[in-house]
Amino acid sequence: MAKKPNYSFEKRQKEIAKKKKKEEKRLNKLEKSAEEDQTPSVDDADTVINSSD
């Protein structure tokens, strides 16, 4: 007699994998936004004030 498949276990494993992937995406998004906040914008870095008149 063949072994009966455990669909509950398979479903639970899929749910865990989905949650893990979603969490990784969330963390990557947070890291990316944090990096953008830390780097100065181009306008701030290139602005030079000349008062030699």
Image: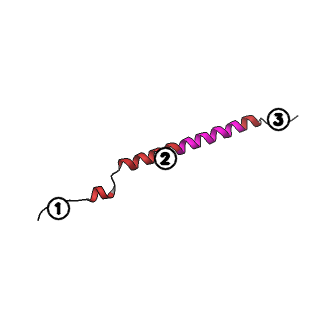
Q: What segment carries the magenta color?
A: 11-25
The residue at which mark 3 appears reads as 4
Q: How many residues crowd mark 3 within 10 Å: few (<14), some (14–19), many (20+)?
A: few
Dividing the picture into quarters, in which one does residue 44 lie?
bottom left
- Residue type, mark 2 in image: Lys
Residue 35 image offset from top left, x and y in percent: 40, 47
User: Of callouts 3 and 1, which one flags the residue occurring earlier in the amino acid sequence?
Assistant: 3
Q: Nearer the viewer, residue 14 or 30?
A: 30
Image coordinates of residue 15 in percent, x first then y, are 66, 39
Instruction: Kindly indicate the quadrant of the structure image that contains residue 53.
Output: bottom left
Label 1 crowd bin: few (<14), some (14–19), many (20+), radius 10 Å: few
> Which colour style is shown?
secondary structure
Helix, strand or loop under label 2: helix
Residue at image x 32%, y 58%?
42
Residue 14 is left or right of residue 7, and the answer is left
Callout 1–callout 2 Cβ contact below 8 Å: no
- Residue 28 percent coordinates (x, y): 49, 45
| Residue for point 36% across, 47% down | 38
- Determine whether the residue tagged by mark 1 lies in a helix, strand or loop: loop
| Residue at horizontal 40 percent and vertical 50 percent from the top | 36
As measured in the structure, the alpha-carbon distance from the residue carrying label 3 to the one carrying label 1 is: 80 Å
Left or right of 44, for residue 24: right
Mark 3 or 2: in front is 2
Q: CA distance from mark 3 to mark 2?
A: 41 Å
Q: Is residue 35 above or below residue 16?
A: below
Of the residues shown, which amino acid type is indicated by label 3? Answer: Lys
Residue holding disc 1: 50
From mark 1 to mark 2, how far is it between C-alphas? Answer: 39 Å
User: Looking at the rendering, which quadrant does residue 2 occupy?
Assistant: top right
Q: Position of residue 32 (x, y in %)?
A: 45, 48
